[in-house]
Image (tube, helix red, strand yellow):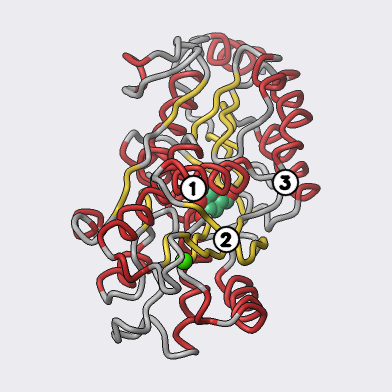
Amino acid sequence: MKKYLAVLLVAVLAVPAFAASDDPIGACIYKYDDTFMTNVRRAMIAEAEKTDQDLDVVDSQNRQPLQNDQVDTHISKGVKALIINPVDRTAAEPIMNKAKAEDLPIVFINREPYAEVMQAYDKIWYVGAKAEESGTQSGQIIVDYFKKNPKADRNGDGKIQYIMIRGEQGHQDAVLRTEYSTQAMRLGGFEIVELGSDTANWDKVQATDKMKGFISAVGIDNIEAVLANNDDMALGAIEALKAEGYNLGDPAKYIPVVGVDATAPALEAMSKGEMLGTVLNDADNQGYAAVRIAAVASEGKPVTEESIHYVITDGKYVWIPYRPVTAENYKEFMK
Ligand code: GAL
Ligand code: CA
């Protein structure tokens, strides 16, 4: 008996303190039923497989209390790092505190914690994209279209009459894309008139409903452009336009619609001439970067541009650039 105990002790003591462990990285995605986040999740899984990491990822089903429990479960299972896409960005603080109490590296993605939360722990990172950029780029696509196609100003008043379909209330991407896309139209030299603006929570079906409501409220003849904070909602709005005989190929019945994300269905709609443009929200690089940070940090190594191969700002932020996607270049983004 004594002999076995001794062998066991030696075995336990022999585990080197800093070896890359076989423990999983624990991840939570705010909900699986989200086109863009599904692409990010796929990229995370691909990077984990490529680098031989065990990634344990779960669906938080758009419920913050469920996600909080999932974080506890990950921690009790002994994960070596966390990657969290919060349901509610204001819930990042208690989650950060759970990680901090265990000295676990934590990478937030897609929903940016407030700066105070980011400053309150030395093993916290954020991977995302600058929403301002996507707003500016999508507004610019509309500006370019109106400059090239004077008839897009259907009532000839020199102003752009538009509908705005916003993402989730309080989400930095919804707030900033809305603000910067309208600013880009103004800076592009157009007076703008908002005929309607509402949230459709990133969701295609909700966007169709909202767009149908706007069409009956203001009349389809008066709408000159539709800006949506993401592609699913742009596609939802297009469904409502198609139901009125618009965006089906007749150039006299076309309203330019722009989104953000460059998802496969949006690129497909562009190829059919139903949708004017979008902005690449680079799911692949966001997913890869998150997994690399988690892996490097869990080995106790410094997270730097050299170790993760992404530019890192203020030691904590990885910003993946957006890119405008138009008729000229959309094919490049089709997989
Ligand atoms: C945005 C994306 C949306 C939605 C949202 C979820 O960056 O453009 O389509 O996925 O994140 O938080
Ligand atoms: Ca006009």
Three-letter amino acid code at disc 3?
Gln
Disc 3 designates what residue?
67
Pinpoint residue 10: horizontal percent, then vertical percent: 55, 10
Disc 2 designates what residue?
164
Callout 1–callout 2 Cβ contact below 8 Å:
yes
Quadrant containing the C terminus in the rendered view:
bottom left
Separation of disc 1 and disc 2 at Cα? 10 Å
Q: Which numbered dot is residue 270?
A: none
Quadrant containing the N terminus in the rendered view:
top right
Three-letter amino acid code at disc 1?
Ser
Pinpoint residue 60: horizontal percent, then vertical percent: 67, 52
Pinpoint residue 289: horizontal percent, then vertical percent: 41, 32
- Mark 1 or mark 2, which has the lower sequence index? 2
Residue at 60% x, 50% y is 58
Q: Which numbered dot is residue 181?
A: 1
In the image shown, does 104 or 9 lie closer to the viewer? 104
Element under label 3? helix
